Image (cartoon, grey):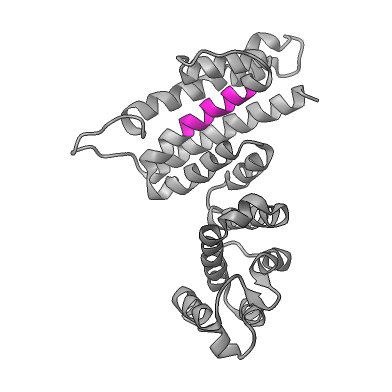
Amino acid sequence: MPKLSQIEKGTFMKLFNRGGYVLNFSTNDFNLFTLESVGVPLCEVYKQSKGKSLMAYISEATEDDTIKLLKDLLDYYEVHYKYEIENDEEHTKLYGRCKDIMDRILYKKNPLASTAVELKEKFSSAYLSAQIDLMLKMQSENPTEAIGKAKELVESCCKTILDEKGVEWDKNWDVSQLTGETIKLLKLMPKDIPDTTPVATEMKAILGNLRTIATNLAALRNPYGSGHGKSASYKGLEERHAKLAVGSSITLVSFLWDTHERKGI
């Protein structure tokens, strides 16, 4: 498992440590929480305040145990501090950084995880960011759902770009039509590459395949994704297939969004 840097650990501590307290835990509740999380009642063991006990533990615990406890505390924070997340700008930013760090750690075995985190930071839409989170999570937990979300992410990205460019789109358009219109708007059609451009043939071939990615995601979703009812005997694809769909979606969306931002300069 990837390691947390000291700066990253400090970011979590800044979110959780409230002047010696840890969130809203009493000493007894904190001991019970940490005992259940990592098998250690921190205040009982370290004989210090909750905040200092937490700092002492993560300074000497194994990487896996540190990540486990911080992840559990972050989950607790998400449940019990929704108002703060939505209304306190400083803590909203801290929470966002902690969540992105944890995503990087937990999804490191997916080589596109860092791209996904960067993509979330670029999107101003909370909905798109939430889609990415859910899609990554579902790769292993529910590959069928991940395949559906991969296709939906492309649709949402294209609609957002078209909206920001003031281009009307038909609600009946499928993902292939949405992608085609977006590619045309961003001048990513093969015909937009002059023949005199170095490696023009290769670039035209790659650009020509962009729309194919979206079309094939839709084709994959129809029998295997989350958008259609299934019989009792239905068997979905495996995690590796979901990762292929998710990876293709993230690659396409990242390229389209980067181009959209570049065109807006």
Q: Nearer the viewer, residue 259 or 11?
A: 11
Name the residue rendered at 69%, 30% in the picture.
258
- Residue occupying the point 73% across, 56% down: 90
Question: Range of the magenta residues?
Answer: 150-161
Q: Specify the farthest residue to the right.
A: 265
Q: Is residue 77 above or below residue 17?
A: above
Question: For the view shown, which residue lies furthest in the left direction?
Answer: 233
Where, by quadrant of the figure, is residue 85 drawn?
bottom right
Left or right: 148 with respect to 47? left
Total count of labels:
0
Q: Is residue 162 visible?
A: yes
Instruction: Examine the structure image and report whether residue 154 is included in the region drawn in magenta.
Output: yes
Q: Residue at x 47, y 73 (%)?
A: 37
Above or below 255: residue 180: above
**Relative to 64, 192 lies left or right:** right
Q: Give me the residue at 61% from left, 25% from top.
A: 160
Instruction: Name the image quarter holding the N terminus.
Output: bottom right
Q: Tell me where residue 255 appears, x and y as whole percent.
A: 64, 29
Residue 64 position by quadrant? bottom right
Q: Quadrant where the C terminus lies?
A: top right
Please say whether residue 5 is visible from this viewpoint: no
Asked if residue 95 is positioned above or below residue 70 in the image, the reply reads above
Taking the magenta stretch, the answer to whether it contains residue 187 is: no
Residue 261 in the image: x percent, y percent?
73, 28
Q: Position of residue 152 (x, y in %)?
A: 48, 30
Q: Main secondary structure of the magenta part?
A: helix
Q: Quadrant of residue 253?
A: top right
Q: Position of residue 205 (x, y in %)?
A: 60, 17
Q: Nearer the viewer, residue 172 or 26?
A: 26
Q: Is residue 245 above or below residue 56?
A: above
